[in-house]
Amino acid sequence: MMKKTLTLIFTLFLAIFTSACNSEKSVILFNKYRFTQETITSNSNTNIFKPGDRINYLVTLPKPIESKLLLIQIVKIGGDKQERYGYELVWGKTVKIRDEQVYYYTNYIVLNDPGAYIMKVYSRDNPTKLLTSAYFYVKN
């Protein structure tokens, strides 16, 4: 009886700790250059840019989104002194994901105002749940 109980406990323990959850998450990459197979893994990936630079971004999606619409926001952290909590919505856009790009979206934006920014990405399927976010900086 004791041997069966120990075997059962060991089996449960082994099942709990060896079953890994494969939960891939969305990621945002920034780069000074357009994303290609060469630039996606190069040293040009950065989150620090100069005013007026093209800020190329790549949003990866582990699974396709049903509505094929992403909501992208850029918020400046420590915005103008009049802004509440120091956050200022700088840019927002709803983008449609093309059929051949169901696992990623890429584009660029140009910002001229130095500061710290955060890019937030939501799915139109569930606009209250944040898919991913990433910080980047515009410095002189």
Image: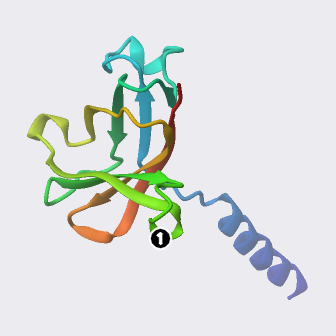
The image shows residue 51, relative to residue 70, as above or below, that is above
Q: Position of residue 33 (x, y in %)?
A: 36, 16
Residue that label 1 marks: 84
Query: Given the current orientation, which residue lies at the most extreme front position?
Result: 82
**Is residue 56 visible to us here?**
yes
Residues packed near mark 1 inside 10 Å, few (<14), some (14 to 19) or many (20 plus)? few
Q: For the residue marked with disc 1, what is the amino acid?
A: Arg
Q: Position of residue 74 (x, y in %)?
A: 36, 50
Q: Nearer the viewer, residue 113 or 14?
A: 113
**Is residue 24 visible to us here?**
no
Q: Residue at x 49, y 14 (%)?
A: 42
The image's colour scheme reads rainbow
Q: Residue at x 35, y 24 (%)?
A: 52
- Residue 128 falls left or right of residue 99: right
Q: Secondary structure at mark 1?
A: helix
- Residue 11 falls left or right of residue 69: right
Q: Position of residue 75 (x, y in %)?
A: 41, 53
Q: Residue at x 13, y 60 (%)?
A: 67
Quadrant location, the N terminus: bottom right
The image shows residue 137, relative to residue 3, as above or below, that is above
Number of numbered tags placed on the structure image: 1
Query: Given the current orientation, which residue lies at the most extreme right position?
Result: 2
- Residue 2 falls left or right of residue 94: right
